[in-house]
Image (spheres, rainbow, N blue to C red):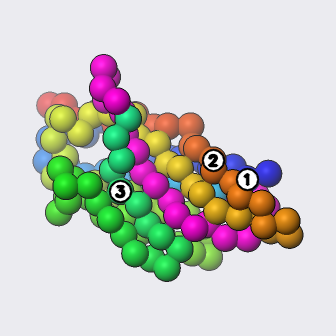
């Protein structure tokens, strides 16, 4: 079984920074892609960005230049670094890991529990 546990988040003033972590654990052969999503109150969930198994990253335009995604491959931990935060970045942020299990190579697609980020003065 594969699990994703998120940490980080909280309250920050506009212009501040936060880092979210996403630790994937369990019977993992490979994490093919780790996605970060967010969902603001009353809005649909939107993709923030992703990092592939070879370390390529992509950030959605509104967050480009302010957010970066990185990873520690040895621990299957992905990080979302958020700088120059704006009130409109307030949302619940979710991590999603897609990959293959060890042994069977069965696919997995698991979500973290979500973490609240609030940007307010």
Are there few (<14), some (14-19), or many (20+) residues within 10 Å of tag 3? many
| Gap in angstroms between the C-alphas marked 1 and 3 | 21 Å
Circle 1 sits on which residue? 2
* Residues at circles 2 and 3 in contact by the CB criterion of under 8 Å: no
Q: Name the residue located 53 percent from the left edge and 74 percent from the top edge.
A: 53
Say which element carries label 2: strand
Asked if residue 52 is among those painted magenta in the image, a careful observer would answer: no
| Gap in angstroms between the C-alphas marked 2 and 3 | 16 Å
Are there few (<14), some (14-19), or many (20+) residues within 10 Å of tag 1? some
| Residue 21 seen | no
The answer to which image quadrant residue 50 occupies is: bottom left
- Which span is picked out in magenta? 25-44
Magenta: main secondary structure equals: strand
Circle 2 sits on which residue? 110
Say which element carries label 1: strand
Residue 70 lies, in percent from the top left, at 41, 69
Are there few (<14), some (14-19), or many (20+) residues within 10 Å of tag 2? some
| Residue 107 seen | yes
Circle 3 sits on which residue? 49
* Residues at circles 1 and 2 in contact by the CB criterion of under 8 Å: yes
The image shows residue 79, relative to residue 38, as above or below, that is below
Say which element carries label 3: strand
Residue 57 lies, in percent from the top left, at 36, 69
């Amino acid at each position: 079984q594969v699990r994703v546990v998120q940490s980080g988040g909280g309250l920050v003033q506009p212009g501040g920074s936060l880092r979210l972590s996403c630790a994937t654990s369990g019977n993992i052969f490979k994490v093919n892609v780790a996605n970060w999503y967010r969902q603001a109150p009353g809005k649909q969930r939107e993709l923030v960005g992703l990092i592939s198994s070879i370390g390529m990253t992509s950030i959605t335009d509104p967050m480009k230049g302010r957010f970066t995604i990185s990873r520690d491959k040895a621990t299957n931990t992905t990080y979302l670094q958020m700088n120059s935060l704006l009130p409109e970045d307030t949302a619940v942020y979710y991590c999603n890991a897609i990959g293959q299990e060890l042994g069977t190579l069965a696919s997995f697609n698991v979500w973290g529990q979500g973490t609240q980020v609030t940007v307010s003065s």
